[in-house]
Image (cartoon, rainbow, N blue to C red):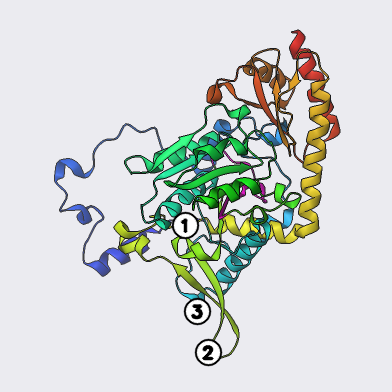
Amino acid sequence: MYISHTDSEREAMLRAIGVDSLEALFHDVPAQHRFPKLDLPPALTEMEARAELQAVSDANEPASNLACFLGAGAYKHYTPAAVDAILRRGEVYTAYTPYQPEVSQGTLQAIFEYQSLVAALTGMDVSNASHYDGATAVAEAVNMAYANFRGKRSKVILSAGLHPQYCQVVNTYVAGTPIQVSCASDPLASKPDSLIPQIDSNTALVIVQYPDFFGRIFDYTALAKAVHAQGALLAIAVNPIALGLLKTPGEMGADIVTAEGQALGIPLSYGGPYLGIFATRQEYVRKMAGRLVGETVDTRSGQRAYVLTLTAREQHIRREKATSNICTNQGLIALASAIYMSLLGKHGLRQVAELCYHKAHYAADQISRIKGYKLVCPEPFFNEFVIKCPKPVAEINEHLLEHGILGGYDLEPDYGLKKHALLAVTEMNTRDEIDALVETLSEASHG
């Protein structure tokens, strides 16, 4: 809490520095610029400011008040109360990078545990800690692959099933560089095999999503072999909850795994902060951006100790030689996901994944029985699926919102897929909510 200084405290500070007024501190600023008249409203008390901000906030409709079927990268999952209770403890409530290990053992250990959990979840050797969000993690995979080949390979292939916002961030990152980005144009027709003919000796990286943006589940083992046969790398952007149930990217032969970690105990927010998960194989660790905490032994006491094993100084002082210029992390959010994974454990995470899977399939089956609605993709899916609707998705979503339901993601703006909605179901959606969605969708088709 902010506590203002008293008049006597201000006077004491002024005496200590040898001036007699606050105005004297601004003596070197030209007079005409010292105290300009600003067109500002009258000052508010804390109580008045809070009431005004609350009124602004009340104009929004939070997902917590609605039956939410909107996903597309950010999901309404249940966060155990213990996550926030532990996260807000004073000794861990910081996102600051622990440069001084002797006074940062707790923070370093927490990061080490996070890295260990991510490595186990993805089937990879090492994880960093961490990136801003899922999109920047994908873009950093591009940077890492380009650096790995020392600029001798400049082609990056993006699956049409990759999140459209991830593709946009990648294109922003590579603008003005020799990196060439290739992406298929027919998203729903794209399959892993369709990427293979595009791979050549100039390819540095192929990026796919698992499950993909449309919820479909593909096994990328054959693609990984084809990528490696050309000497390139394979990156897989994952839904971390799905890995509680599905085969790991490491088992498929992925070289890099990225993810948006929001699903792991981080509440929905309008823009974050979120968490960019990044894991890779041991052989590429020195090209990986971000921080890597390691476990060692204190030479004096013989006790277990934690240190920043790897943090590229080039990111700070030799920027022209850096793999990446990211110089911060999402340490607090990474800790939240580590607490979540620790609380659920292997079996709890699988249970959440199974609930998402079965509830989504129940919803898809019920919706596809409504006249005018069609389940578009025949492939196996996890907790998201594409439905073709009898009316524009915006119209249907407006009708759903009137009934307290947050509808699916409209695929027309990104892909030109008219009347196509991407719906997401999580463990938070009850059977009653799903049945209400089905009933309201049926009403919307007749309205």
Q: Nearer the viewer, residue 108 or 297?
A: 297
Whole-percent x and y of residue 24?
A: 20, 55
Residue drawn 83% across and 25% down? Answer: 366
Q: Is residue 214 magenta?
A: no
Q: What amino acid does circle 1 point to?
A: Ile
Q: Residue furthest bottom?
A: 300
The residue that label 3 is drawn on is 102
Whole-percent x and y of residue 356?
A: 77, 41
Q: What amino acid does circle 3 point to?
A: Glu
- Density class for disc 3 (Cα within 10 Å; few <14, some 14-19, many ≥20) is few
Task: Indicate whether 363 appears above or below 304.
Answer: above
Residue drawn 67% across and 62% down? Answer: 120
Between label 1 and label 3, give the one nearer the viewer. 3
- Which circle marks residue 299 in the picture? 2
Between label 2 and label 3, give the one nearer the viewer. 2
Please say whether residue 48 is visible from this viewpoint: no
Q: Earlier in the sequence, mark 2 or mark 3?
A: 3
Residue drawn 37% across and 66% down? Answer: 313
Cβ atoms at labels 1 and 3 below 8 Å apart: no
- Which circle marks residue 3 in the picture? 1
Is 269 left or right of 431, judged from the image as shown? Answer: left
